[in-house]
Image (tube, grey):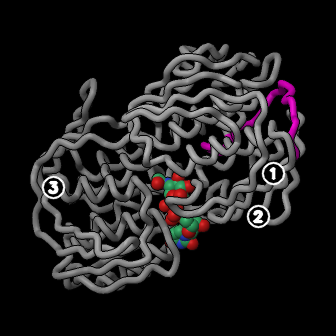
Amino acid sequence: MQKLEVFGAKKLKGQINISGSKNASLPILAATLLSKNQITLRNLPKVKDIETMMNLLDSLGSNIKKAKDKIIINNSYQKKTFASYNLVKTMRAGILVLGPLLAKFGNAKVSLPGGCAIGTRPVDIHLDALSKLGVKYKIIQGYVHATAPKGLIGNKIRFSKISVGATENLIIAASFAKGSTYLSNIAIEAEIKDLINFLKSMGCNIKWTGKRSVKIEGVSEVEDITYPVMFDRIEAGTYLIAAAVTEGNLKIKNIIPKIIQTEINILKKIGAKINIKKDEVHIVGNKKIKSINIKTAPYPGFPTDLQAQMMVLLCKANKQSVIKEDIFENRFMHVAELNRMGAQILIKGNKAIVQGNINFAPAELMATDLRASVSLVLAALTAKGKSVINRIYHLDRGYENIEKKLKRVGAKIRRVN
Ligand code: UD1
């Protein structure tokens, strides 16, 4: 099994080009199932989760051609409606094919994604909302067996809780439903706006009616288009934190800074110097990091996907900080590993009390989930000496060329078998 060896502590300096967004690409790939012809996507990141989603589409009968900087998906012969456990088990976003399959064929059998390290992660909100569009479903042996006997029919749906995935599944499904669908209390992450832009460029009829609400008028076919996926805001945030934590000097390029304004504001408060240009952010890390209390929240709040990375930075702050995790119930798996490196973090319910003024010591470490793994890389970058990070398949699910990108800005890091 591959590992990463990191030799700290080096200040990072240079520029990093941010890849396409994993979390925008996944629902967009699922939404290509609405097409009966050809869709071309650009700027997809080269990461494992995207490969898994392409394998899932392939198993459903999509024909996918990969070129250097684009993929072409042809759905002329796409007819299958069965998404197997093998393909959905490693990646929860597999459930996103349920909406488009029901919209296109009126039936689907999709594996439940199951639990994962960061929490139970049910799909009840997806299923409740789909049933309001006329879907009948049963759960049999781990699979959702769903049918829409009269086709999907538009309705008014208010989500009981803000969910990124359920919002995406419903927006895609309602785009092909008969009549109008009104969705409210939706998630408004930048990736959802990108999905809506993608669907609109295919000819779907979606209008914003409020800050957290849309009206969708169903259509019955979509056009062939080419679409470039947005940048990965979590990757951008991770490298901004990497600069801050190593007292580095990095230009984070190919991004839209206003999409990560919350993160930029927090890094400024902590003491980093930040200069914003049209499509880049230049950050210079400060020796003295100020403590801050943070809670994760749906966009535009602070993202749960950056909580672990921010915790590493706050270990170096001048005083104690508190991080409250309000999205997932069990997203502190990185804490035990960080504490093994000398951090002093105490968990109380959904709060992490983070002592400051920590100098991380190198260690042999175990990655537990995608964002937890990258937080270990960040801590290792600041620890003088050799750290070894095991189980980096978690990291490969979502970070394109991480060791190459870090090497180019001065990190001493290598992948070993
Ligand atoms: C997406 C992101 C993930 C991010 C998360 C929150 C993708 C592929 N993944 O995950 O990286 O951490 O948003 O920003 O985009 N919930 C239910 N029932 C449901 C659905 C969700 O109870 O049917 C709960 C979840 O357990 C969680 C909360 O709602 O506590 C938010 O989850 P959700 O926004 O749905 O996250 P994902 O779409 O799975």
Looking at the rendered image, the quarter that the C terminus falls into is: top right
Q: Which circle, 1 or 3, is nearer the viewer?
A: 1
Quarter assignment of residue 50: top left
Q: Position of residue 222 (x, y in %)?
A: 12, 59
Tag count: 3
Residue 147, position in %: x, y?
A: 30, 78
* Magenta-drawn stretch, dominant element (helix, strand or loop): loop
Lower sequence index among marks 2 and 1: 1
**Above or below, comparing residue 102 to residue 404 in the picture:** below
Q: Is disc 1 placed on a helix, strand or loop?
A: strand
Res. 371 visible in picture: yes
Residue lying at 50% horizontally and 59% vertically, measured from the top left? 300
Return the x and y of residue 198 as percentages of the image width and height.
24, 53
Separation of residues labelled 3 and 2 (CA atoms): 41 Å
Q: In this figure, which residue is indicated by the disc labeled 1?
A: 321
Q: Earlier in the sequence, mark 3 or mark 2?
A: 3
Residue extent of the magenta highlight:
355-372
At a point 63% along the width and 25% down the height, the residue shown is: 2
Q: Quadrant of residue 99?
A: bottom left
Marks 1 and 3 sit apart, C-alpha to C-alpha, by 46 Å
**Image point (64%, 30%), residue name:** 242
Residue topped by disc 3: 202
Mark 3: C-beta under 8 Å from nearest atom of ligand 1: no
Residue 351 drawn in magenta: no
Q: Mark 2: which amino acid?
A: Asn
Looking at the rendered structure, the kind of residue marked 1 is: Ser
Is residue 398 positioned above or below 23 on the image? above
SS under mark 3: helix
Residue 350 shows which numbered tag? 2
Query: Looking at numbered disc 3 in the image, what kind of residue is underneath it?
Result: Met
In space, the residues marked 2 and 1 are separated at their CA atoms by 14 Å
